[in-house]
Amino acid sequence: MDFSQEIDTKLQPQLFDFSKKHSWTEEYSFNFTKKLITMTISTIMHLRNYFPSREFTLHYINDFPVLIINETSENQEVKFFVREMEKAFDAMEKKYLRRLILFFYVKPKESEEIKTLETYALSLRYDNGFTGNTLHQNSKCDITMLNLTDTEEIISSTIKMLNSCMILTKNLINVTPEIQASLKLLCYGYTPMSYMNAIGESAISNFRDITDECRCPKNPILKAPFHKIKLSMSYAEEQYRRYIDRVCCACKSLGGYGSTLRCRICKTLQHAICYNIYSSDCNNTNHICITCSDSNLNCTDTTLTIMLPKMREEVCVMRRVLAFMNTKDEISEKLVRTELDLSNRQFLEVYNTLSFNEVIHTSGNKDEEETNWIVNKVRCRETLQRSEHLGEKRVTIRWPLPKEALVLK
């Protein structure tokens, strides 16, 4: 086989069949949602390295690879999860299931409370696809949704959610042998007690929810016409510390130069200058980052919320660069790259913008390995002041980004 050839994902096992249009009946919505839940639980278990790779099977969503727990596995723990998920799907079909919680915990000693380290909660609602009314009765609906549901949008939201899981779990402390995992089922209040006793809402009775301890950035809500899923991820402080001590900023840079702020929602760090805060006193306990902001939570710098992500990144990078250069008379290109942790693309954009706004001019011969920039302090301060009002006023920095400028020489 020629491994240099690109793999044709159309020949690979697809989790969803997009080869033809489907009528979104309640039954189809239920089966679709089952796959979404299975995929989410499987992805988290794989990312946390809880089961060995051989316990998963490879599938694709278009060309996006996903690993699904092998339902035919002989592993006893895998069998337990398969059984619990079957219970969850039965409760979901009857519209009883309210939340399905995957949680990691430290096995307690006698008389000790379970120490919950991580929770991944899937909250479910059962909606009428046309009116949006929540359905709490145990009945099926004959309504069909043909050509009214954007399947690609659902898949796009799903992939975004999986990417969020990848980013977050990558920065967590590894799961060790003493850490165990389980599933907890929570049902709506109208669920018959006999049914709740039959399925057992949880295999662990003294489970302690940590949802309010460390909330992570919000994820997209996955909406099929008759089912809606919302994933919430929470971590105990000791499990979460590697994540909350990293810089997660709109400028896309992990570098920690300058003062930082801590978001009161997701607890991650952002560069203060990116949010228009220049003071050395950055103990802003009410700071909310752009990721966690919404209609009820205003971002610290509201001008960032009305920008597209690409423009937002450029503005934040320029704010950091200008604030850094405002303290220098002459600076080397290498120092700008390393101190501010700029990618090649960001560096080229910065160079073009600074040159265009006459903030810098170069010194030394072009043949020299290292070029220095002479900083025009007046132009630097003027440009920095204009960056404070980007999005609010028509006064703006000019961003010359010709295609040829983005090609490394």
Image: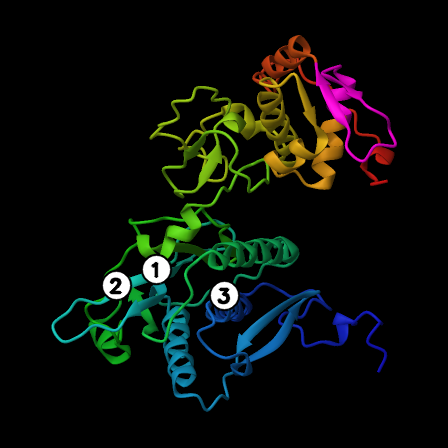
Question: Which of the two discs, 2 and 1, labels the residue nearer the N terminus?
Answer: 1
Residue shown at the point (74%, 31%) measured from the top left: 349
Which residue is under mark 2? 190
Name the amino acid type tagged 3: Thr
Is residue 42 shown above or below 231? below
Q: Which residue lies furthest to the bottom in this view?
A: 74
376 on left or right of 287: right
Residue 169 is situated, as x and y percent measured from the top left of the image, at 47, 59
Residue 89 is situated, as x and y percent measured from the top left of the image, at 42, 73
Residue 178 is situated, as x and y percent measured from the top left of the image, at 32, 74
Residue interval drawn in magenta: 352-375
Is residue 65 shown above or below 276? below
In this orientation, which residue lies closer to the viewer: 44 or 157?
44
Q: How crowded is mark 1: few (under 14 residues within 10 Å), some or many (20 or more)?
A: some
Residue 374 is situated, as x and y percent measured from the top left of the image, at 72, 18
Q: Quadrant of residue 56?
A: bottom right
Question: Which of the two discs, 1 and 3, labels the residue nearer the N terminus?
Answer: 3
Which residue is under mark 3? 40
Whether the magenta-drawn stretch holds residue 373 is answered as yes
